[in-house]
Image (cartoon, rainbow, N blue to C red):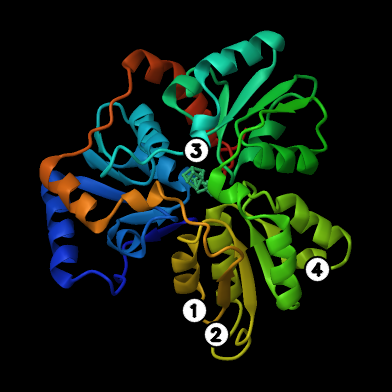
Amino acid sequence: MTVTDVGTRAGRVDDAWFAEVRELARKRDAVLLAHNYQLPEIQDVADHTGDSLALSRIAAESSASTIVFCGVHFMAETAKILAPDKTVLIPDARAGCSLADSITVDELRAWKAEYPGAVVVSYVNTTAAVKAETDICCTSSNAVEVVASVPAEQEVLFLPDQFLGAHVRRTLGRTNMHVWAGECHVHAGINGAELAAQSAAHPDAELFVHPECGCATSALYLAGSGAVPADRVKILSTGGMLDAARASHAVTDPATAHQGKTVLVATEVGMLHQLRRAAPEIDFRAVNERASCRYMKMITAEALLRSLRDGTDEVHVDPELAARGRAAVQRMIAIGRPGGGE
Ligand code: 13P
Ligand code: SF4
């Protein structure tokens, strides 16, 4: 389970805002989806909060006629590719992604020309044009399974995130996999030195590390060198972090066993809101408190209200591009699903 359903609201917005958003969503027959990095009030007012894979699946299956995607632009585009007949809105279309910007479709075409016959695996953090040149998309929660689904003798071009690519290559021990040198400015800024300093300051803490982080290699080094016991280092997607927090909460008496437990979290700071809700007895701490995605934070309370009132900003994907990218995105949402893997 990687999705949180609509719940109690964060204390920063008033009741009137919350009620108006819910009422406008009802009138528009809209489902509100929020990524785990959204502002707390946006996460709380949404119908579903989750990671990029879970939200794509909900977008594909929702019966609502409008999807309001509180996330970044490639996520809303992915929803439109999966649900072309629905109206897809993003409250602020300027919410881009530095990782998606790290490869253009022309760069991908040139790379493919160097490796004819290679299978192209693109992280979902890519533009619709790049998806149209892709064989299978993946997210951080199913990247390993997606690459494992490619026959061992076939070469793989993995893009655009170098840290996620390195994590997949290391996990599968796959040598015929070429990785694009892109990165997300937020996750690349969470570095190994910070992680080492934090884990020295909290020697009993567990580490939750998103595979996009520049410190993922360092986390594995800390585990390999014995500085942090290997079972305390977890490389997880945002949805995986929540699953781990919920599992930890479920198996213990929150009043006793986990008092004093600390988890160091290496990802965008918006993640802390859901983690603290899932396991309030655990002390979740950001490895880097400045790791905030300015694009995710463009979806403000005002922007969401405007979007629902005025129907802005509508997301359009060229139908020909969407048709070419759809199979790659559909394979992504099938792989890693219980009973749906390839
Ligand atoms: P998840 O796939 O773990 O949701 O993370 C995606 C991400 O980094 C979006 O910016
Ligand atoms: Fe893109 Fe990074 Fe922001 Fe995620 S955190 S939306 S990968 S820039």
Q: Amino acid at mark 1?
A: Pro
- On residue 228, the disc is 4
Vertical relation: 201 (above or below) 29: below
Q: Nearer the viewer, mark 2 or mark 4?
A: 4
Mark 3 CB lies closer than 8 A to ligand 2: yes
- Mark found first going from the N terminus, 1 or 4: 4
Q: Nearer the viewer, residue 311 or 256?
A: 311
- Helix, strand or loop for disc 2: loop
- Circles 3 and 4: CB atoms closer than 8 Å: no
> Image quadrant of residue 233?
bottom right
- Check disc 3: other Cα within 10 Å, few if <14, some if 14-19, many if 20+: some
Q: Nearer the viewer, mark 3 or mark 4?
A: 3
- On residue 98, the disc is 3
- Check disc 1: other Cα within 10 Å, few if <14, some if 14-19, many if 20+: some
Q: Nearer the viewer, mark 1 or mark 3?
A: 3
- Mark found first going from the N terminus, 1 or 3: 3
- Mark found first going from the N terminus, 3 or 4: 3
